[in-house]
Amino acid sequence: MSNTETALKDATTSIAGVIGAALVDYTSGMALGTIGGSKEFDLAVAAAGNTDVVRSKLRTMELLGLKDEIEDILITLGTQYHLIRLIKTRGHTGLFLYLALDKDRSNLAMARHQLRRIEAELEV
């Protein structure tokens, strides 16, 4: 089991090309923990903005009557991947792990695999 800080550090060391990572509460839009980022890439702003993405997708699924769960959401930019993984382990709801990755330095399949592992070990 790992706590938020350990899980985020694990993400930056085990996943190639990480620009920043955050654990986010999508009910409030607050980042519960962040690592990485820069002056040009504010993780608090990214956390709040991606909260809207998650809420919108959940609302759309409800309107469509889809009885399924979001595993992850991928946003592909010209130079970056943004990966959102909803936390479903041990009854946690309302949280997601967020990763921003440099497209040239990362392997998306490996990033998804490692993020799944980190989620399984996370204790909030």
Image: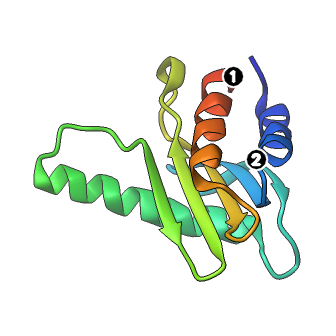
Numbered disc 2: secondary structure: loop
Element at label 1? loop
Q: Residue at x 32, y 38 (%)?
A: 69
Q: Is residue 58 left or right of residue 31?
A: left
Q: How busy is the neighbourhood of tag 1: few (under 14 within 10 Å), some, or many (20 plus)?
A: some
User: Where residue 67 appears, x then y in whole percent?
Assistant: 18, 37
At horizontal 80% and vertical 41% (from top left) the residue drawn is: 14
x, y percentage for residue 96? 56, 45
Q: Are marks 1 and 2 in contact (CB under 8 Å)?
A: no
- Rendered position, 65 above or below 49: above
Question: What is the quadrant of residue 10 in the picture?
Answer: top right
Up/down of 40 relative to 54, above or below: below
Determine if residue 28 is in view. no
Q: Residue at x 57, y 45 (%)?
A: 112
Of label 1 and label 2, which has the lower sequence position? 2
Question: Left of 59 or right of it: where is 27?
Answer: right
Quadrant where the N terminus lies? top right
79 vs 13: above or below: below
Decide if residue 106 is in sight here.
yes
Label of residue 88 in the image: none
Type of colouring:
rainbow
Task: Sort mark 2 into few (<14), some (14-19) or many (20+) by Cα contacts within 10 Å.
Answer: many
Q: Residue furthest left?
A: 65
Q: Position of residue 81 (x, y in %)?
A: 60, 66
Residue 15, label in figure: 2
Question: Please, what is the three-letter code of the amino acid marked with disc 2?
Answer: Ile
Quadrant for the C terminus, please.
Answer: top right
Amino acid type for the residue under numbered disc 1: Glu
Residue at left offset 64%, top offset 29%: 117
Which mark is nearer the camera, 1 or 2?
Answer: 2
Residue labelled with disc 1: 123
State the separation of the CA atoms marked 1 and 2. 20 Å
